[in-house]
Amino acid sequence: MTGRITHWINGKPWDGVAERTGEVYDPATGKVSGRVDFASQSEVDSAVAAAAAAFPAWRDASLAKRSNVLFKFRELLAARKDDLAAIVTAEHGKVLDDAAGEVQRALEAVEFACGIPHLLKGGFSENVSTKVDVYSIQQPLGVVAVISPFNFPAMVPLWFIPNAIACGNAVVLKPSEKDPSAAVFIAELWAEAGLPDGVLNVLHGDKVAVDGLLEHRTVKAVSFVGSTPIARYVYETGTKHGKRVQALGGAKNHMVVLPDADLDLAADAAVSAGFGSAGERCMAISVVVAVDPIGDELVEKISSRMAGLHIGDGRRTGCEMGPLVTRAHRDRVESYVEAGVASGATLAVDGRGHPVDGAAEGFWLGPTLFDNVGTDMSIYTDEIFGPVLSVMRARSYDEALELVNSNPYGNGTAIFTNDGGAARRFQNEVEVGMVGVNVPIPVPVGYYSFGGWKDSLFGDTHAYGTHGIHFFTRSKVVTNRWLDPSHGGVNLGFPRNI
Ligand code: NAD
């Protein structure tokens, strides 16, 4: 039995017949679990038209009305957290605890947007000149598009949607075609929360849908999250068509371990940040930089922890790491294990033989650890996005820093040390957008903003938090002079009692 997954346009499921569809898998069984409709230009036009029609009334809805919908959505999402987590696990494969954690982080972004009346307050200056006042207002952009990746099918759309609609915009979401059901569930919850029809639409599909949105005259802004080549393409194409674009790309996150660090803490962190969610996180640690002389001891501690990792169907109790998202992605990641061996890295732990608690046809690959990795090897230069962790050796803090700063990506990084001075120097000198000190995955809380540097972000605005409010509004400054007839001014015919 496989279900149909279709677009959500103007407050209801689309009732047309798709020209193209795609298969959706349960990665833990390897079986097709659904078929998703792929949008053609005509469905892109319908979704954008629904959003454009809903926009004026939503823009003019009071802040109280908008925040009411947000509070209701927050309650519904909290109440249905386990249902959404189960949907994520069924199509993505990550273990249920991890999926619930994803929804929890999404809730933070919703809670932030509930404060929209405060967040949209502008500035006011009285008497900038005699009887002249100036104030600023933040106005919505109109129809905005959100294009999201497979690895956080609930959280990443909800990094953007709450702020976008709280600011008064109407949204077209194009989620990943690999795990599209979470987006539909989220749209249904918004409808239940009282969001008017058309303010949020979900359009499924691939490049055709993305290009349709990037080139559409009515779409004013695009928030994209995905791999670096596509992020660059989306940024260039969207801006060429006159849109405001923020495009968050891929990553190669380094964790520097100084000799004075607590090595047990560092090894635990490397394992959870390297292999959690099967390494399919843009904030996953993919390179551990061991500063002399602790390399051998650290590799030993990481290896021994990896042996005990429980790999299997994310719905089963006790599983710590699930399958990869598709067979093709599993095969690609596995090919990096072969490439690492061929390039001369030391294969400290080979994940290919790791025991699996799940169906034989699932897209499994156990955790792999390489040591003595060099900067010219493809396991270092490429974003693998799977359970393959590399250890590199550095002779000093400066050499470790140079390694991190020379990498073209700059999403997240961490330093493990007990030296406050070294940590402070690192946070100051490292060219990366998000930094953890003894914290391996430093994803900012909902009232800060998320974003990398260099090839990990195209555009200048990060996701959610105050950057999100900035991205989804444009500011207007009003200069005001009201003449006062009782003090010799000219009566311009305006009512006197306002
Ligand atoms: P992806 O780039 O393949 O796909 C992202 C989105 O772009 C999807 O909606 C997809 O349908 C669309 N897309 C794919 N190919 C396209 C094309 N040729 N033209 C137009 N649109 C296209 O990414 P993915 O595999 O879904 O997700 C994993 C990637 O996302 C990793 O590189 C990861 O680092 C990155 N990521 C980054 C962040 C961040 O915040 N920086 C967060 C999560 C994931």
Image (cartoon, rainbow, N blue to C red):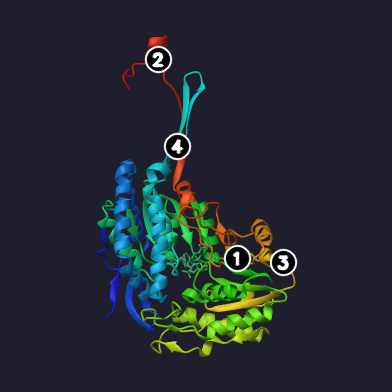
Residue 427: give its label.
none
Vertical side of 327 occupied by 134: above or below:
above
Residue found at x 66% / y 78% = 377
Label 1 is placed on what type of residue? Ala
Residue found at x 60% / y 65% = 414
The numbered mark, 4 or 3, whose residue comes first in the sequence reads 4
Q: Please say whether residue 8 is visible from this viewpoint.
A: no
Label 2 is placed on what type of residue? Asp
Judged from the image, the secondary structure of the residue bearing numbered disc 4 is loop
Q: Which residue is mark 3?
A: 397
Say whether mark 4 is within 8 Å of ligand 1: no
Judged from the image, the secondary structure of the residue bearing numbered disc 1 is strand
Dot 2 alpha-carbon crowd within 10 angstroms: few under 14, some 14 to 19, many 20 or more = few
The numbered mark, 2 or 3, whose residue comes first in the sequence reads 3
What's the distance in space between the residues labelled 4 and 3, CA to CA?
A: 45 Å
Say whether mark 1 is within 8 Å of ligand 1: no
What's the distance in space between the residues labelled 1 and 2, CA to CA?
A: 61 Å
Proximity of marks 2 and 3: CB atoms separated by less than 8 Å: no
Q: Which residue is mark 4?
A: 122
Residue 414: give its label.
1
